Image: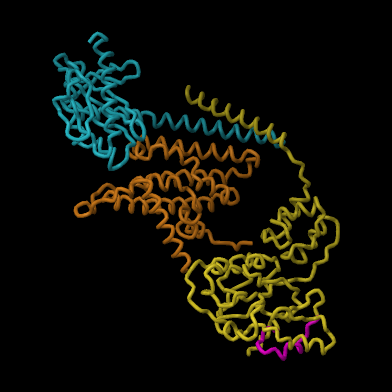
Chain colours: A yellow, B cyan, C orange
Amino acid sequence: MSILYSALLMGGTGLLFSIFLVIANKTFHVEIDPRISQIEETLPGVNCGGCGYASCASYAEAIVKKGAKLNQCVVADKDTLDALGTIMGTKVVKGEKRIAVVMCRGDRESAKFPGIYRGIKDCAAAIYSGDVAKRCKYGCIGLGSCVSSCPFDAIKISAHGIPVVSLDKCTGCGNCVEACPRGLIELHPVSQKIHVYCKSHDPGAIYKTVCTNACIGCGLCVKAAEADGKSDALKTADNLVIVNYDNYQLKPEYIEKCPTGAINIEQNIIIK
Amino acid sequence: MNISTRMIVSLTVVTVLAGLALAFCYEIFKDKIDQNAVKALNDSINEVIPGAVSKEDISKDDMVMYKVYDKPLSDDTKNFLGYAIVVNAGGYQGTIKLIVSVTPDFSKIITFRVLEHSETPGLGAYITSTGFISQFESLSLNQPIKVKKGVANKDANEISAISGATISSKAVTNGLNEGLAKAKILILGSNQ
Amino acid sequence: MSSKKPAIYHFLKGFWEENPVFVQILGTCPTLAVTATAVNGIGMGLATTFVLILSCVVVSIIKNLIPNEVRIGVYTVIIAAFVTLADLFLKAYFPDLSKSLGPFVPLIVVNCIIFGRIEAFSAKNNAWLSFLDALGNGLGFTITLIIMGSIRELLGKGTWFGIPVLLSFYKPMLVMILPTGAFFTYGTLMAISNALKQKS
């Protein structure tokens, strides 16, 4: 009756181990608040990190255990936020949507590329190639590390070699901000449409050999703002104009005198 | 039922079912597997003792040994062709399993075959080649076989090692020496 | 956030898009160890496919009955049962293949492809899709093993499925049937696969 013996032996082993697992389960049991899994199921489940936590699961845990704010999820729409509010018993107000802004307009037409880069398709890797990838030491290399990092397909390299952000798909999660090795991407509220699209500290004298869309820190926009009574809206520092984002006050008239087109409006690029 | 009971029931049921299914399958395949083993053994005996028809199992003490005849065991006119002995040797990469045949008076090796080995292909694996094996044929069992690097003197019971595979060559030789010495004592008694 | 894919996609993805050997990089141990000959490759591939299909389908049928806490044990017992069945079958009807595959048939139990597909797919999908997924992955694995085995056998021994093909004028590169050759072949084929994928 070896069949019976085998079945008993296997079954006995299974029984023993399952009892062992039951004991282990009870010994190592962790009390879990059911709201955590409810919230986790309500959240989009993309694990983009936009809320500031590593995953939707950890954000859910933070909400229930540590009182994290309910409107930190950048991907959640109004229905999701209302559902979160219902689970936790509070009202949720969505913060203003922020999207990614790429602070560089040095594309294939305006910037100088001293050589042909044939290496790993990663911006951080290309920086080590010296100036081959691009002469401007501050500008966008255009190999698409930001594109790979986006979980929403919201950023793409345009035909001219510079990333463009899709306003409807971008959720402001911040993954591209982390991915850019030159820190050229920043998150700003959608309502802020005027930015200085350059981070180069190269002096004006050489800008024509580096990139014709560069900010040379000439300060014409600063003067225009001062003339309008907004003296702290913009300032120059080390050949570059810096926007005051704490008190954003930029208007389209400030950018009219820009000789290179570095300070510009998002949707309406003035080509010089 | 609560989670603990479900855990116990599901794991136990699955293992019982698996045990039943496997035992059942084993019964189905067991005969064919045994047949294969018997066929493999008979095939290897036929290779080392040409003309073999039947064998008598005289295995003892972990040594697998057979007396081989040229006619069925029931036939009284059968001739005793020799002994077929399975020898295990410690090779370079693992155990080398050999089947060696010796003359009925245990004086000479007839031949051997390698049943299993894990020696290096292209080097130690040459122990399966006829060139290597033929060196052992008709060597005397009255003294140990010796391995020489380079030219060997067959009259002095020497064989030539495979160049680049001295360890494998020595493994086979030592295995044969030790295994056959042990078999000789078991078969012929310790005073021979 | 994934769009609904047609059932046939789950079968086809195992061949190229989610090839278990070059993309998912699972089951590396048998891939390197048994591909010294093409016949070993096809034998291991089919044995693994057999176990993969049965395990994935059974798991996807009973997935709701098994508590989360014991699922690893239960899945492993199921996989091990099917592997034992495959091993017995090979020993009975293909004894030479069984001998040359050696310990790698029992090792199918811990082949990552099987547990990988079960956890990633069968535990969350119905039996039909699980069957397609397992079949695709298994056949993709098999074809890859045949390719690797063929290359290594042709270059390392001059034969293909045991038939001498290159023997007369070609001196075999012994290194190809050794572990070194396994890594060379694996790496080269993966590089080619990645290059082709990047182009598309």
**Foreground residue, C141 or A219?**
A219
Query: Chief secondary structure of the magenta span?
Result: loop
Relative image position of residue B21 (x, y in whole percent)? 49, 33
Q: Residue at x 56, y 49 (%)?
A: C122
Place residue B120 in its image quadrant.
top left
Question: Image quadrant for the C terminus of chain A?
Answer: bottom right
Relative image position of residue A129 (x, y in whole percent)? 52, 69
Place residue A23 in its image quadrant.
top right
For residue A60, above or below residue A211: above
Which residues lie in the magenta part?
Answer: A249-264
Taking the view exactly as shown, the residue that stands out farthest to the top is B191
Query: As drawn, is C110 to the left or to the right of A257?
Result: left
Q: Is residue B1 visible?
A: no
Query: As drawn, is A112 to the left or to the right of A259?
Result: left
Relative image position of residue A17 (x, y in whole percent)? 61, 31
For residue A232, above or below residue B82: below
Q: Residue at x 73, y 57 (%)?
A: A42
For residue A107, above or below residue B54: below
**Foreground residue, A235 or B45?**
A235
Residue A257 within the segment the image draws in magenta: yes
Q: Residue at x 80, y 67 (%)?
A: A94
Q: Is residue A212 visible?
A: yes
Relative image position of residue A264 (x, y in whole percent)? 70, 84
Q: How many numbered discs?
A: 0
Q: Residue at x 51, y 31 (%)?
A: B19
Residue C27 within the segment the image draws in magenta: no
